[in-house]
Image: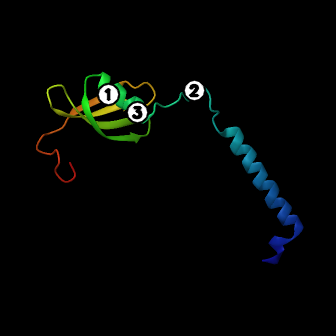
């Protein structure tokens, strides 16, 4: 066990660690225009409301999208999926009224 603490092995481990950090830095994708900024929660709620939905609740960030529950102009509950970068609504599902407020619903 003490052989691993000799100056040679200590320098070798440092060299390998340094090489690993350099390789990792070279292989990591750069932050650039390829990674546009994500909209904040307030902006997402505003986009949903401007699309005609109200009572936005349960806003959650999931990967590249936000999900939320809202109400249509007719008072029907819906589940909305919004692109986190553009703010476009990319999915909409009506929520069964029988499940609203039920455990797990």
Mark 3 falls on what kind of element?
Answer: helix
Q: Nearer the viewer, residue 98 or 17?
A: 98
Vertical placement of residue 17 versus 94, above or below: below
Nearest-to-viewer mark from 1 and 3: 3
Quadrant where the image shows the N terminus: bottom right
For this view, does 69 lie left or right of residue 30?
Answer: left
Mark 3 Cα shell of 10 Å, populated few (<14), some (14-19), many (≥20): few
Work out how far the residue at label 2 is from the one at label 3, CA to CA, in angstroms: 23 Å
Identify residue for label 1: 48
Q: Earlier in the sequence, mark 2 or mark 1?
A: 2
Residue 72 makes an appearance in the image:
yes
Question: Image quarter for residue 12?
Answer: bottom right
State the residue position of label 2.
Answer: 34
Residue 32: mark: none
Q: Is residue 21 above or below residue 38?
A: below
Q: Residue furthest left?
A: 98
């Amino acid at each position: 066990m003490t052989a691993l603490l000799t100056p040679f092995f200590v320098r070798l481990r440092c060299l390998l660690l340094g090489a690993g950090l350099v390789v990792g830095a070279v292989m990591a994708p750069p932050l650039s225009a390829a990674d546009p900024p994500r909209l904040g929660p307030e902006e997402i709620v505003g986009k949903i409301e401007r699309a005609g939905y109200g009572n936005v609740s349960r806003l959650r960030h999931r990967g590249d999208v936000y999900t939320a529950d809202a109400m249509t102009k007719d008072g029907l509950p819906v589940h909305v999926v919004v692109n986190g970068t553009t703010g476009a609504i990319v999915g909409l599902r009506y929520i069964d009224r029988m499940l609203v407020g039920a455990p797990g619903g």
